[in-house]
Image (cartoon, rainbow, N blue to C red):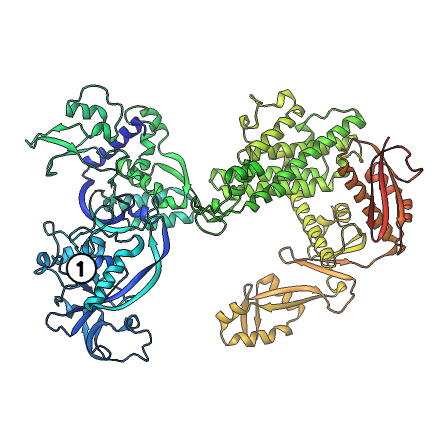
Amino acid sequence: MDTTFMESVWWVFKQLFEKDQVYRGYRVLPYSTGLNTPLSNNEAQQNYKDTQDPAVVVSFPLLDDPQTCLLAWTTTPWTLPSNVALAAHPDFEYVKILDEESGKHFILLEALMSTLYKDLKKAKFKVVDRYKGKDMLGWRYEPLFDYFVEQFKDHGFKVLNAEYVTADSGVGIVHQSPAFGQDDYEVAMKAGVINEKRLAPNPVDETGHFTDEVRDFAGMHVKLEGKADKAIIKHLKGTGRLIRDSQITHSYPFCWRSDTPLIYRAVPAWFIKIQPIIPQMLENIEKSHWVPASVKNRFTSGVSRAPDWNVSRNRYWGTPIPLWASSDLKEIVCVGSTQELKELSGFKGELTDLHREKVDDITIPSKQGKGELRRIEEVFDCWFESGSMPYAGSHYPFENEATFKDGFPGDFVAEGLDQTRGWFYSLAVLGTHLFGCLPFKNCVVNGIVLAEDGKKMSKRLKNYPDPAIVMTQYGSDALRLYLINSPVVRAEPLRFKEAGVKEIVAKVLLPFWNSYQFFEQQVALLKKVGNIDYVFDPEAESSNTNVMDRWILASCQSLLKFVNEEMEAYRLYTVVPRLLGLIENTTNWYIKLNRRRLKGELGVEDTKHALNTLFEVLYTLTRGLAPFTPFITDNVYQRLLPHIPQSLQGEDPRSVHFLAFPEVRSELFDVAVERRVARMQKIIDLGRLTRERRTIGLKTPLKSLVVIHTDAVYLEDVRSLETYVCEELNIRDLVLSADEDAYDVQYSVIADAKNLGQKFKKDAAKVKKALPGLSADEIRAFMKEGKITVAGIELGADDLLVKRGIKEGGNADLEPAVDAADDVLVILDVASHPELVQEGLAREVIARVQRLRKKAGLVATDDVKMEYRVLADPENVGLDEACRDQQRMFEKVLRRGVDRVGQEGEGDVVVQEEMEIQRATLSLRLLRL
């Protein structure tokens, strides 16, 4: 680790030491036998797993009545050799039963008899007495083992009272092993079973193996492979003390680094006081901004219950804790810098490394006549180092003081949800201790990325795709966008799926790229047809009256305004969906509905307006997406750059990443146009839905679509875009009406059964029975007012669902669709009309021609001759007549007619293919001109 960073960490610790916020104590802590060190409570929470452990019930005969046994239940048999007491809740009522099978009396909690007997109805026992837990206080029992009898015969092996005892599991009496449980430790200390001189029995070494103190099990690891548990259970069976032996699956903590099961073990450690600063920490947290906001509540809840922080670790590597102490720990000196260490120790020479191998041999002369003070063995918890980052990162206070003060607190920090127990917590503790505030103003929290199976990603399990392959196959832009547009940015877990990255390519990046390519093709076409070099002109928008141009430009401004507001509030998860929405609007709406204009069918000036609009959108998207997809956006930007006049280029135009985020152009806002187009989109979506229900493709022309809405403004908005609706839905007529009766519109209501049942109980059935009798006028009034009285009971908007449609059993050629949010109903006439059949066939031919052009690798500027021949028409669908009579449509869409094939071999054939259209066989070929 960097020496300057370590020196600042020392300074941070010395500030706390001088404020009397540091102390040495014994604490039962999560302990990793894999790392041979205690962990913080935060670290212990990071790797819980479901695991199977033994669950045993053990007997403790009373000294005064050996035939009466106290029972205790435990899932850690390895702690039983260290038992020195039993704990009962003072307010619980315990029963003394006679077990007829063994003839012995057992004492346990009546509510937990099922732990002792699997089937209480068949169990043979009887209750002979009852006791309160407080009445059992001081009862003495026979020890399980003799290892610690001499030490504790006068102070232990008795019943204590403890309110932490629960009636949720076990038998209501808890065996006490103070060295291996914090509650046990506190209860035993309070009762005088242990004290500073009479330490809790701790026959487990640093590696997790039993010491020689427990001679029968010496050398066995207490957790790994369960050997110690099995040996102890076997021993207890032999002594007749084992009453029940079973297994339990429960959530158990594992070391987050070594992935070995943790134990709880009393160890000497150094602590930072947390309790005194909790009120100020909570006040500081309340002043900060968290995204998402829900995480703040979770963090606050954890902080309010936080114990003192164990910051020492028994490792070699890490920042050494800068405490030099006498052998009896009566004299302690805290060092806050390398210079101070040199002055106190008399060390000569350079001190450029503060790791243990460099500083452990340095001693400081005692001022109390205790010889040489040596550095304590422990190093810092890594979270103390990470929590010191705001200061140590700039070597504060030894240099960069002005820079530090200008940037403190930082604008934001960002990390995973698990850091509410880690980095966020350590930052908050040290910031509050040192400066009375959090070292950050905003906290952005992301969720955890899991494997597709919902488990943590694991190198051992290899349950995730190779990142290098994912990026090679799909690109880093796709991976970035997949993650940014996932639940993980809302602090929720994400099950990573490679298919999701692939979908981003297909649904976002390719459409974006194709939109750019389409733009370039039309620019090339403009050059070829009109000899005009396209140049972007932002001022042209002011004279543009086309409604679709005004809509997409207004949508861009609304997007930019939204992005600015949301990014300022650090709500990344709301931004990307809106950016992707603009791509959707550009590719599937703007370009699709304006192809004719962009191809030049409506004149040069209109084409220039359309191209200018499309360029503005692409340029906005390129800059807006640049932080999220840096590579494809820079690629597109480099290709758009030649179309931007020198005067409008950025100060450094070499990359999109050198440009400022696009500014909102307020003059392009048009709320009315955005509303009109949104309503048009809704009608088109409903029209597509009706076609899908009847499996009628868009290439089949239909006669009419009726749109019914009670709002005249809504209908007028749709009327203003009638041409687009008709073209997109391939219908001849669009009928707009507010007269529901003319189309026999029917209303009905359905009850929300669950909601009604919860609110009205028995009356729910009465309400349901009365619903079919409601009139259309009553239902309309309910839709308007949000309430209605049915069978004498007032119902609200959440209680009923309104259904609207046309009368069942009516005209089978009418297909309705409803959008409840917009209160709009559409009715599509799906009947087949002979005069429209030819148009449908012609559209099929056009689609096949365009597919053939694409297959041949032709672009918009490549002119070719198109020829056809009908090879077979067994069902006489009229394909030859359609090709002959629909030449105007071919010329309009393909810019050239489709001719009947002349002599075979005539001309240079680019591509030729036979295909089937409605069971007629057609041969199409493209020839070079």
Q: Residue furthest left?
A: 369
Image position of 815 (left or right of 443): right
Using residue 174 as the reference point, say whether residue 870 is left or right of it.
right
Kind of residue at disc 1: Asn
Q: Nearer the viewer, residue 836 or 447?
A: 447
| Residue 511 lies in quadrant | top right
Q: Position of residue 104 (x, y in %)?
A: 19, 76
Q: Residue 499, percent across and down?
A: 57, 46
Most foreground residue, 337 or 39: 39
Residue 391, given in percent of the width and then of the height, sits at: 31, 31
Q: Residue at x 70, y 52 (%)?
A: 683
Q: Is 419 left, or right, of 644 in this rendering?
A: left
For the residue labelled by badge 1, is the local secondary structure a helix, a strand or a loop? loop
Which residue sits furthest top?
349
Q: Is residue 907 left or right of residue 344?
A: right
In the foreground, 632 or 892: 632
Q: Badge 1 is on which residue?
A: 83
Residue 665 visible in rendering: no
Q: Looking at the image, which is closer to me, 435 or 5?
A: 5
Instruction: Give the number of marks.
Output: 1
Q: Is residue 383 above or below residue 1?
A: below
One can see residue 487 in this view: yes
Q: Residue at x 73, y 31 (%)?
A: 521
Q: Position of residue 439 (x, y in %)?
A: 34, 36
Alpha-carbon neighbours of circle 1 within 10 Å: few (<14), some, or many (≥20)? many
Compared with 634, 53 (above or below) is below
Q: In what quadrant of the picture does the C terminus appear?
A: top right
Establish if 568 lies above or below 77.
above
**Quadrant of the image for the N terminus?**
top left
393 up-or-down from 902: above or below: above
